[in-house]
Amino acid sequence: MRHMALLAFLSIIVFLFLLTQYFPLKYYDIIVQNCKSLDPLLVISVIKTESSFRENAESSLGAYGLMQLMPETAEWLNKKFKTNYDYKIPEDNIALGCLYLNYLMEKDGDIYKALVHYNTGPYASDEIKNDAGERYIKKVMRNYKLYKFLYRR
């Protein structure tokens, strides 16, 4: 009976280890430096959803990097916040993505609306916001719940 308990315990440890490999804390220190009032685990969940930590990820629409920023959005953020980040550099991509998420949170006052606007852009039709935005929220929040389960300190 003790062998079964030990086997069950070891299985749980291996499972949690594998989960941490699939849900890593990559770039965590950079995220903490840039997230302001956002939960760093939420930001890392956005990165997981957007690019799965592929630094050079590029969408068919031209969004780039870890946080999948459109070049126009990066340019707008640099002008608005008087920064000079290069969205093609991973650390800068995170800084710009955090600036954008923080801005959207302040503007929208709600994390769900902010995430929809982050994903679809501010000028998307209501149909796109409702369809793509809702699916996106589900993905980010699923990742966020897993990250909180694994790493909440």
Image: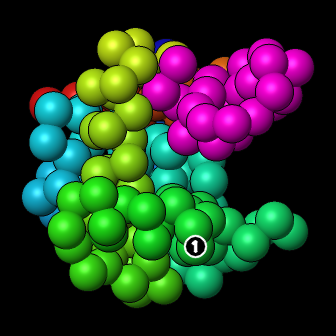
Q: Is residue 23 left or right of residue 108?
A: right
Horizontal and vertical percent for residue 152? 23, 29
Main secondary structure of the magenta stretch:
helix
Place residue 94 in its image quadrant: bottom left
Range shown magenta:
113-137
Nearest to the observer: residue 85 or residue 94 = 85
Place residue 86 in its image quadrant: bottom left
Nearest to the observer: residue 48 or residue 129 = 129
Horizontal and vertical percent for residue 10? 45, 39
Q: Residue at x 57, y 67 (%)?
A: 72
Q: How is the image coloured?
A: rainbow
Nearest to the observer: residue 48 or residue 115 = 115
Q: Residue at x 55, y 52 (%)?
A: 48
For residue 99, above or below residue 40: below
Q: Is residue 43 left or right of residue 40?
A: right
Which residue is the site of mark 1? 71
Horizontal and vertical percent for residue 27? 30, 66
